[in-house]
Image: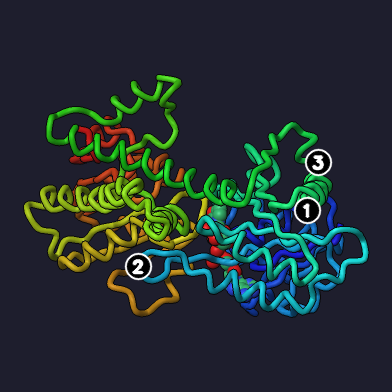
């Protein structure tokens, strides 16, 4: 099938490659010339395990091309929208990019001679967006489906090709719905045949599935961080607590690791956008708890800051602090709403000499001259002479690091485990004062 992917960021570029991997002819379109140039040359514009390999493989076979020219979409049967929906004023989602993409696509829609032509929304949008956009997409001779994406950065390739489930939000008209569903089933045939559940619903429910899944995940993380605060006050151990409650199948152990909180390009903006939309719908009170979830997430970082102050004798001023991890999660270079970067800025604001490092994201940061902290591409350089080591992202390189090697590099042996991912005993045995979130 000839398909196009509009917006080639973390979601769209991976989706374009994955669709080519399924055997489709894919054209990726983006307004960012540098990104398109990099992708066309087989260079990944971001860090994502396994991505460069499929990008190069599919470019070589000729089934995948990238362009900034929207006319290249004419005649394709499926057009994915994968542009950003960042946080706008008052927390609401900014839909400028989605609307701009549709406007840019319109002159070239309705030209497929090969059966039904479908525009498929993948971006995360407020409930009601698809119903609002459908008439103008229909006027261009195409059907609109909302097919939200659930991929996790760090596992994006795997999650796109082997998702837990696929959700189709279909048009109200039953004939249109059947035709659109048939196109998507054909497109995703190898994924469906491998047993992936495919759930069919209306636009509104599909949009809500995505946003409520993210709200639930954010709530789970903030729940365990709230428990960490109670453990800190009461002398409990949140890691042991999480392990014990996670063994209850009704609760489950995933997303129950206490730490300095969630970040990234999805959870923070999505819970705010969800609240803003619920307000518009007159049901804001139903989602008031998400304000608490957001606040607990901010507090989680501040608890780590308190620990840093007390470990350094009441103030971080003039102390050298090594912050390990600036990506919001391991195996990614995404620094949107990064808890590690926020902490680094706060420490620097209190007078600390902060050196940040990250296996994937530091090479991006070094090009920025206007930062309140230093950037070391090399872990050893970041650790040298540090008065405090703060783990902000649980990269394997950091969690597997030998504490006695670190002990020989640092100035003073203090470590804060902002992800409850280090082995406390090993670090204490190497002479470190060790503190974690919600545990002794
Ligand atoms: P991103 O910022 O990495 O990528 C967005 C891309 O869209 C950019 O390359 C930008 O240049 C391009 N763009 C903007 N306007 C355009 C236009 N008019 N025409 C063509 N291209 C345009 O964002 P992302 O992380 O890939 O997220 C995209 C969407 O997917 C968001 O709605 C996000 O919430 C959702 N999502 C992201 C993830 C994830 O893990 N990143 C997972 C699930 C859903």
Residue 125 versus residue 353: which sits nearer the camera?
Answer: 125
**Could you tell me residue 148's position as x and y percent?**
61, 51
Query: Is 192 rendered above or below residue 22?
Result: above
**Could you tell me residue 90's position as x and y percent?**
35, 67
What is the spatial separation of the Cα atoms under label 1 and label 2, in whole angstroms?
36 Å
Q: In this view, does 382 lie to the left or right of 87?
A: left
Residue at image coords 30%, 30% = 239
Colour style of the rendered protein structure? rainbow
- Tell me the number on the disc at residue 190: 3
Q: Is residue 327 visible?
A: no
Classify residue 366 by image quadrant: bottom left
SS label for mark 3: helix
Query: Is 395 rendered above or below residue 233?
Result: below
Residue 142 versus residue 194: which sits nearer the camera?
Answer: 142
Q: Name the residue carrying label 1.
A: 176
Residue 130 versus residue 209: which sits nearer the camera?
Answer: 130
Residue at image coords 35%, 48% = 287
SS label for mark 1: helix
Q: Earlier in the sequence, mark 1 or mark 3?
A: 1
| Label 1 CB less than 8 angstroms from ligand 1 | no
Q: Which residue lies furthest to the left in this view?
A: 314
Q: Name the residue carrying label 2.
A: 90
Q: Assess whether mark 2 and mark 3 are in contact (beta carbons under 8 angstroms).
A: no
Q: Is residue 180 left or right of residue 333?
A: right
Q: Which of marks 3 and 2 is nearer the N terminus?
A: 2
What is the spatial separation of the Cα atoms under label 1 and label 3, in whole angstroms?
23 Å
Q: Is residue 362 left or right of residue 111?
A: left
């Amino acid at each position: 099938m000839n398909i196009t992917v509009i917006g080639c960021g973390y979601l769209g570029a991976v989706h374009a490659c994955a669709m080519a991997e399924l055997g489709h002819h894919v054209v990726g379109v983006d307004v960012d010339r540098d990104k398109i140039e990099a992708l066309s040359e087989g260079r990944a514009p971001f860090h994502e395990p396994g991505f460069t390999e499929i990008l190069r493989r599919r470019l070589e076979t000729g089934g995948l091309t990238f362009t900034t020219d929207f006319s290249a979409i004419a005649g394709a049967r499926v057009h994915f929208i994968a542009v950003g929906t960042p946080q706008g004023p008052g927390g609401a989602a900014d839909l400028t990019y989605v609307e701009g993409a549709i406007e840019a696509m319109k002159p070239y829609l309705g030209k497929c001679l090969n059966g039904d032509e479908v525009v498929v929304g993948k971006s995360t949008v407020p409930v009601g967006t698809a119903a609002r956009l459908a008439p103008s997409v229909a006027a261009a001779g195409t059907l609109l489906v909302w097919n939200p994406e659930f991929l996790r950065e760090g596992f994006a390739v795997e999650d796109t090709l082997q998702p837990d489930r696929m959700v189709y939000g279909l048009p109200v008209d039953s004939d249109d719905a059947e035709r659109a569903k048939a196109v998507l089933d054909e497109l995703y045939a190898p994924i469906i045949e491998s047993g992936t559940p495919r759930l069919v619903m209306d636009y509104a429910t599909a949009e809500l599935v995505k946003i409520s899944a993210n709200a639930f995940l954010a709530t789970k993380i903030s729940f365990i961080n709230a428990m960490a605060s109670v453990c800190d006050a009461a002398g409990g151990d949140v890691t042991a607590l999480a392990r014990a409650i996670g063994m209850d199948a009704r609760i489950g152990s995933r997303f129950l690791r206490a730490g300095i909180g969630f970040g990234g390009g999805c959870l923070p903006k999505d819970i705010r956008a969800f609240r803003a939309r619920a307000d518009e719908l007159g049901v804001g009170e139903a989602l008031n708890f998400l304000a608490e979830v957001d606040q607990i997430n901010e507090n989680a970082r501040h608890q780590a800051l308190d620990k840093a102050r007390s470990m350094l004798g009441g103030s971080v001023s003039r102390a050298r602090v090594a912050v390990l991890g600036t990506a919001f999660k391991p195996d990614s270079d995404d620094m949107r709403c990064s808890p590690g970067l926020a902490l680094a800025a706060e420490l620097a604001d209190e007078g600390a000499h902060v050196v940040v490092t990250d296996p994937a994201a530091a090479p991006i940061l070094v090009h920025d001259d206007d930062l309140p902290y230093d950037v070391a591409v090399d872990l050893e350089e970041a650790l040298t002479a540090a008065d405090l080591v703060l783990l902000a992202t649980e990269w394997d390189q950091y969690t597997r690091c030998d504490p006695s090697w670190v002990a020989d590099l640092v100035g003073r042996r203090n470590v804060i485990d902002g992800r409850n991912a280090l082995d406390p005993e090993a670090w204490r045995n190497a002479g470190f004062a060790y503190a974690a979130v919600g545990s002794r």
